[in-house]
Image: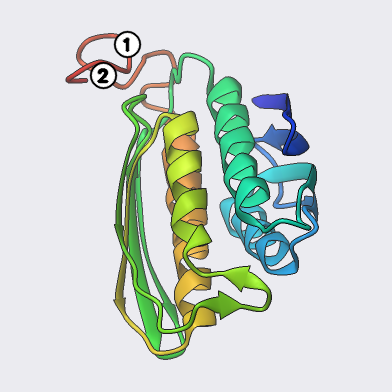
Amino acid sequence: MREATVTRKTKETEIRARVNLDGTGRAEIATGIGFLDHMLEQLARHGLLDIELEAKGDLHIDFHHTTEDTGIVLGEALAKALGDRRGIRRFGEAVIPMDETCSRVALDISNRPHLVWKVEFTRDKLGEMDTELFKEWFQAFAQNGGITLHVENLYGLNNHHIVESCFKGLARALRMAVEIDPRAADSVPSTKGTLGGSTA
């Protein structure tokens, strides 16, 4: 089984996450931030990832540290579960409609982290969560997962639909990229023989 557990403890947060790449979409999420829990449940369900995550953070200050650090820990767990990334399809993409909204996510599990974020919101908050924090989560996840990640909201009006379509797009693109390619199950998907560096 391709799975990993990561624990992170700082003065601001204490987080434990377990990820199984070959799961069924089971989620046990408790961050203390209701909307973030809902988005991470979407990531598990539509990515067919089993995710267990418990976070305790300084929510009495704001949601920034907990949001960013859950992205860090989940990214680290993903990278650890992937190992040398042998046999994976590596690339993934998804275009996700949600009512009036449509978003596109493309990614490369290249071990060269980079985020392109073309998502705008017309509200400052969803529930109690600042909408600016969604970029922080995606940035932390991409950086620590070793993912080149492009997220673009093509159009939409409802802010809830916009962010949810982005998480669902990430889920479906990840599901495609981490899948073992039966035609190349024993090789690292790179002409270099390893992932990372300036070109791969």
Given residues 113 and 187, the one toward you in this image is 113
The location of residue 135, given as percent across then percent down, is 44, 56
Give the residue type at disc 2: Ser
Task: Measure the alpha-carbon separation of dots 2 and 1.
Answer: 6 Å
Residue 31 versus residue 193 in the image, above or below: below
| Element carrying mark 2 | loop
Q: Is residue 177 left or right of residue 76?
A: left
Give the residue type at disc 1: Thr
Given residues 146 and 106, the one toward you in this image is 146
Residue 35 versus residue 90 in the image, above or below: below
Residue ID at (41%, 29%): 146
Which residue sits furthest top?
193
| Any part of residue 1 in sight | no
Residue ID at (72%, 38%): 12
Disc 2 and disc 1 in contact, CB within 8 angstroms: yes
Q: Name the colouring of the figure.
A: rainbow
| Any part of residue 15 in sight | yes
Query: Tag on residue 14?
Result: none
Which residue sits furthest front?
61
Q: Which residue is mark 2?
A: 190
Residue 93 versus residue 186 in the image, above or below: below
Count of numbered circles on the image: 2
Q: Which residue is mark 1?
A: 194
Residue 159 versus residue 49 in the image, above or below: below
**Which of the 4 quarters of the picture holds residue 114?**
top left
| Element carrying mark 1 | loop
Mark 1, Cα crowd under 10 Å, few <14 / some 14-19 / many 20+, is some
Residue ID at (48%, 32%): 145
The N terminus, quarter of image: top right
The C terminus, quarter of image: top left
The location of residue 108, given as percent across then percent down, is 32, 37
Residue ID at (50%, 41%): 141
